[in-house]
Amino acid sequence: MKELFGSPGKASGLVLRIGQCLFAAASIVVMASATGFSSTTAFCYLIASMGLQVLWSFGLACLDIHALRLKKDVQNQILVSLFVVGDWVTAILSLAGASSSAGVMVLFVRDTDICKVERLETQLSCNMFQISIALAFISWFLLAISSYVMFWLLASV
């Protein structure tokens, strides 16, 4: 198989997986600590999709650590096929969650006065929502790189 940046079992792949995991976890923490996130379905979906991404990226980071420590080659066709499917599924779900949340934020900020209202019963943490969504997009971008690399590894078999 080809030697590509971000390949499984390589240090660059481990860096990508750790970055995905950390940014997705940060997105979850920021969103969950914001007041009023549970009133919007898109924000709840973002937390669910980022949770799946944390689990997937953490599992593959552990596999990369194992391969690096034991100097094992994890680039066989069956494993790479599994990585391709998992990466593409989590990438699609993560992009859907980040995009839907970003759409809701555009609605809140530009089309309504929800973020400007200072009533206690409807006070939302709009800045926290935006930070969480930005972190989710960064996490998705790292996952998109991994997905692309996995696709090319599978094609080179």
Image (cartoon, grey):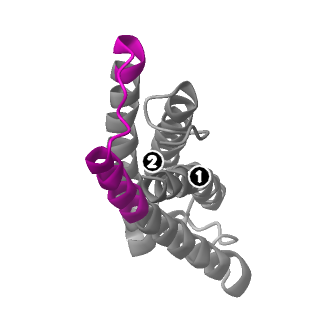
Q: Main secondary structure of the magenta part?
A: helix
**Is residue 75 located in the magenta-colored stretch of the structure?**
yes
Q: Is residue 104 above or below residue 85?
A: below
Q: Residues within 10 Å of mark 1 (few under 14, many from 20)?
A: some
Q: Is residue 19 above or below residue 156?
A: above
Q: Is residue 22 above or below residue 121?
A: above
The residue depicted at 40 percent of the width and 41 percent of the height is 57
Q: CA distance from mark 1 to mark 2?
A: 21 Å
- Find out whether the residues at labels 1 and 2 contact each other: C-beta distance under 8 Å: no
Tell me which corner region of the image, top left, top right, bottom left or bottom right, holds residue 19: top right
Region rendered in magenta: 67-90
Q: Looking at this view, name the residue that lies furthest to the right.
A: 110
The residue depicted at 26 percent of the width and 49 percent of the height is 78
Residue 16 image offset from top left, x and y in percent: 55, 38
User: Going by the image, does 57 lie left or right of 27?
Assistant: left
Q: Nearer the viewer, residue 46 or 38?
A: 46
The amino acid sitting under disc 1 is Ile
Which mark, by number, is residue 28?
A: 2
User: Going by the image, does 146 lie left or right of 117?
Assistant: left
Residue 97 image offset from top left, x and y in percent: 46, 68
**In the rendered structure, which disc, 1 or 2, sits on the residue that comes first in sequence?**
2
Q: Nearer the viewer, mark 1 or mark 2?
A: 1
**Is residue 79 located in the magenta-colored stretch of the structure?**
yes
The residue depicted at 39 percent of the width and 56 percent of the height is 84
Which mark, by number, is residue 145?
A: 1
SS class, disc 1: helix
Q: Looking at this view, name the residue that lies furthest to the bottom.
A: 111
User: Going by the image, does 66 lie left or right of 139?
Assistant: left
User: Going by the image, does 108 lie left or right of 67?
Assistant: right
SS class, disc 2: helix
